[in-house]
Structure formats: structure tokens, C-alpha cells
Amino acid sequence: MALFTPSESPAIVVKEVDLTGVVPNVQSTTGAFVGNFRWGPVEQATLIDGEATLAETFGSPDDNEGRAVDFLSAAYFLRYSNSMQTVRAIDGSAVNATDVSQSSQPVVKNLDNWNAQLAARDSDDNVFVAKWPGALGNSLSVSVCPQSAADSAFTNWIYKGSFDAAPGTSTYATGVGATNDEMHVAVVDEDGLFSGTRGSILETFPFISKASNAKSPDGTSNYAVETINGKSEYVWMAGFGAVGTFDADAGSAAVSGKDYSSEVRNVRTSSLASGVDAGTLSAGNIATGFDLLEDKDTITLDFLIAPGMSSRSDQTTVVNDLVSIAGSTRKDAVVVASPARTDVVNVSSPATQVTNAIATADTFTNSSYLVVDNNYLKVYDKYNDKYRFIPASSSTAGIMAATDANAAPWFSPAGPRRGQYLGITSLASSPNKSQRDTLYKAGVNPISNIPGQGVLLFGDKTKLARPSAFDRINVRRLFLTVERAVSLAARNTLFEFNDEFSRAEFVNIVEPFLREIQGRRGITDFRVVCDATNNTAAVIDRNEFVANIFIKPARSVNYITLNFVAVRTGVEFEEVAGTV
């Protein structure tokens, strides 16, 4: 066969070659937040699209100040964006509610954590365990109705109205010659903390089996333990508990002649108890949560939102950890931070508030990947009917996300056009012009209530100490957007040849993308160099590919000077226009 001949005999061979590579669109509105919540998976990133989903996933806040502030902080970002990676963090005091009280209550953080300890929970004689840590699980009860003679258990069961018929023998058990393997399970909001109504049925599991090998007609498992663990939003099932709780055969495989209700045929209702909420989170707890967001290949995000810590040292620890993630590990996101709570909340002197905010900001790592504001926002907590101060950082990040959606990442988020804070009752700190000047010189963006315009972000600096184009938010975010998009496009060049064709293809993909940004006012000029000058023989022999992308970023207006000049009647304007 000749080299490259498509067929060994005459034939028509159809081939398809895709040369339609483009720079992809990249989202730039996703925030990331770690907080103390009442419910939900722990140490697991969950993408949340709105406040309703936030409350459904992590529970609406109770009157605990820390949990309420964290919930509201996350909710206020979601007023501007519909995308937030949210991680629940806990301390050592949080435990799950269970149906069997123990000297050491379990802590089940997420699905992987549950699978790792399932055998241990079964050996502890637990049947049901609340899905997540916290006192909210104490509101749950679980009622189980097994098969019984003449359906007597089902007939007298308070929850029978939620099921079509009494449990009996499943199709699978019938097929292998076993009997009476079915049971019904109802998960109930006993105290009404989930639904608002005591005794509400939250979910039901009809006709599930006590046989470990039971299958539904569609081939999926119908085994009670696997069904509940795979589908329930409120509880885990560890097993069938101590001897006498269920029939001795419960949990074993169905075989010919096995009767799963020969011993226990009574309804079993268990109230879950002993769940405990997390206490005040430490800087270490917060850092552990953000560590889950380090891998940019698995989690896409744009803003790392620092929560408000109670002390300057904790605030510094958290913020500097986030700057390390953003600037060294991910290199595709910015950190948004406010001062420590004690810097501005309940501090009566505006001058002291400014001094405190600057003192805390000075302890932060100087980086163009960090944006710092000066304030806490007084907002209404509708869940507990009171007002609370939350760090402005989540709303500041939200303003940037809204700027991306309504304009572009390379527009400044500050000022009356794009920098207005939503849903604010008042500010913890209201700096005057002189105090705003002091804050801005220190790299802290002031938030101020401007008469006739509202509460505005009145600065667009990053926390970069030296003069640079990257000391402005719009330039930093322009480059993050371009870098993310072009790096994704460059993946198509991996494992190709480093020759004139590949280099020209790369340039022809990138240049239209940059021209579009130029047309949308993001850059004033650019050049892409990807040729033999930077892809020398030595570079090629090292299996490398080099492209240099030069960009002149557009700059935002920070200072406006208006000169009003009076001239004599007989003077031509052209004579004096250049003298002022």
C-alpha cells in the first residue's frame, strides 16, 4: 500500500476537517463564598443561582448573627448575578441529628464522607441520620410502615394517605420466590422548621425493599438503603438498626422462601435528635472551604468574596489566603474584601473608621488581584425581621458581575452608571470628601452615599502598591478575561506541529477576538506576535509554542478638570484655546 493512499482499491473516501477554531465566550460573573449556614453539604462547592436556591440548599437563616450575616452576604451577591459557588464551613461543634443518641454524634459532611462512614453508622445501630450537620435536623422524624398481616399496620398508619396502597411483595422478590419485602418510608417535618408547618410530609419512598439485591422494573436498585441514600434530600439510611428494630432478614439478599416480615410488622416512627449547629467559624475553617476552589480546571469563578471576620488578624489571614489563591494558584479571579467588622461597625467616629479601614488594608497583600472597599452595609433581614450589617464585599463583587453582564469586564464598576448598591438601608461608615481622598490614596475604594445619586462605589483601584495599568479594576479584569479566553482557544494548538500553518492559524483565531474588544472600547491597540522570531529552532526543539500578545488597555477616568475661561469680545477662540 502506497504511503497516504486512502484506499487499497478505487473508492471515494470522505474526510471531514474542522478548521473553524475560535476564541470561546467565557463567563465572568461567578462569585465564590464560604460561610456558616444552618443546612447543606459541608466542604463541597455548590453552584447557586439565586436567593431561593440558596435558602433551599443551605437553609434560611435563624437569628444567630454569624449565620444570618453569611447568608445575607451570599444573598446580596445574588441580587446582581445568578451564579455563585458556595461552600458551607463548620467548626468542631457541629454534628448530625440521629435516631439513636450516642456519646459521640456523627458528622456527615457530604456524600463521599457518608460513603466512607456508612459501615460505622450501621454498626452504631443508626437507621436514619440527618442529611447534614446542624440543629435543623432535629426537626425531622422518619416513619416506616412494613408489610403486615391483613395490612393492619398500613390501615392505622397516620401517613397512609400519601401512599397508593399497602406495602407487600415486590415484583423482584416474587421473581426469586421471596415474600413481604416492601415497606413505605415518610420523612416528616415534625417541628415545622423546614416547611413552616408542623407535621408536614417532606418526601415519601413507596414500595422500597428490604432485600439488598432488589431491583425496580427499570433495572435500578430498589433496596431501601440505596434508594434513600441516593434520593432523599433530608436523611441518610445507615441500615436496619439493632436486633428487633426490623425483621432479622432485613438487609439480606432475596432468595427463594425468605419472608421479610415474619418477626417485625409494626410501624416504626423515629424522631431525630442531638444535632448541633456550628459555632463561630475561625479563619482556618474559612480557609479550608476556599481551598476547595483552587483548581480552575474544575471550577470556574471570577470573584473570591472574603467574609467579614470579627478581628483584624482573622480578616488579614483570610484575605491574604485568598490573594494567594487568586494571584498565584488560579490567576483568573480577583479577591473582593472589606475591613474587619470591628473596624467600622458600631464605631461612632468617622475618622476612626477611616483610620481602622486603612490600618487593616495595610496588612493585606499588595496585589492587583485584590480589590478592597471600606464599608459594611445595613440591610433588612426578612427572615428574622431585623436589620444587620453585612460586609460590602459581596455587593462590591456583585456590582462587578453586573458590570460584566450589562457592559463588559473592561468597564469600570464604579460611579453613578454602574456602581450603585442595591437594597441598602444605610452605611456603617459615610466618609466625606477628605476622608474619601485618604482612603483612595491607601488603595481602599470608598463607598459613600452621594446626595441625589445613592450609595455608590466611588473608586476603582486594585490593591497594587506601585503605579501601573493594573492598579485599576477594569484593566485587571480585562486581562483576566482575555487570558482565560485565549488560553482556552490555545488548547487546540496542543500536540499540533509548530510550523507556519499552526502559528498563522493561532494568530487568525486571536486577532478577531481582540479586534472585537477594541471595537467595544476595551483596548486601544494590540499586536499578536507568533512567528519565527519567537518560535526559534530551539523553541521548536523543546516542543514549545510561544505567542506574545501586546495590549494597550483602555483607562478609566478618575479625575475630571473643568476649566471655564472668560475672554474679551474681540478675541478669537483659536488664539487662546491652547493657552489654558
Image: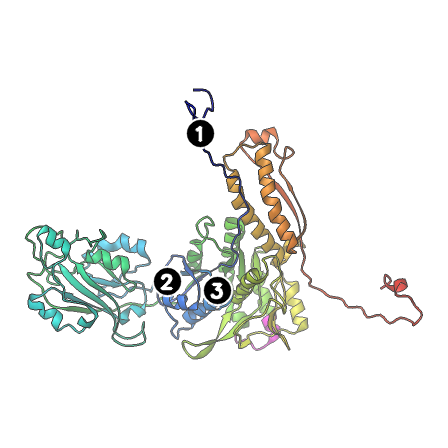
Label 1 near label 3: C-beta < 8 Å? no
Mark 2 or mark 1, which is nearer the start of the sequence? 1
Instruction: Specify the segment rendered in magenta.
Output: 345-354
The number of discs equals: 3
Q: Is residue 197 left or right of residue 352?
A: left
Tell me which residue sits at (52%, 46%) in the image.
488
User: Where residue 140 sits in the image (x, y, percent)?
Assistant: 26, 70
User: Where residue 38 sits in the image (x, y, percent)?
Assistant: 36, 68
Distance, label 1 to label 2, CA atoms, is: 68 Å
Distance, label 3 to label 1, CA atoms, is: 65 Å
Mark 1 or mark 3, which is nearer the start of the sequence? 1
Q: Residues within 10 Å of mark 2 (few under 14, many from 20)?
A: some
- Snapshot quadrant of residue 576: bottom right
Q: Which is nearer the eye, 445 or 346?
A: 445
User: Where residue 299 sits in the image (x, y, percent)?
Assistant: 45, 52
Which structural element holds mark 2? loop
Which residue does the numbered mark 2 point to in the structure image? 91
Question: Given the image, on which type of amino acid does mark 2 rest?
Answer: Asp
Asked whether the viewer can see residue 372, the reply is: yes
Of tags 3 and 1, which is closer to the observer? 1
Question: Given the image, on which type of amino acid does mark 3 rest?
Answer: Pro
Distance, label 2 to label 3, CA atoms, is: 16 Å
Check residue 307 in the rendering and tell me which mark sits there, or answer none. 3
Quadrant showing the C terminus:
bottom right
Mark 3 or mark 2, which is nearer the start of the sequence? 2
Check residue 12 in the rendering and tell me which mark sits there, or answer none. 1
User: Where residue 63 sits in the image (x, y, percent)?
Assistant: 39, 75
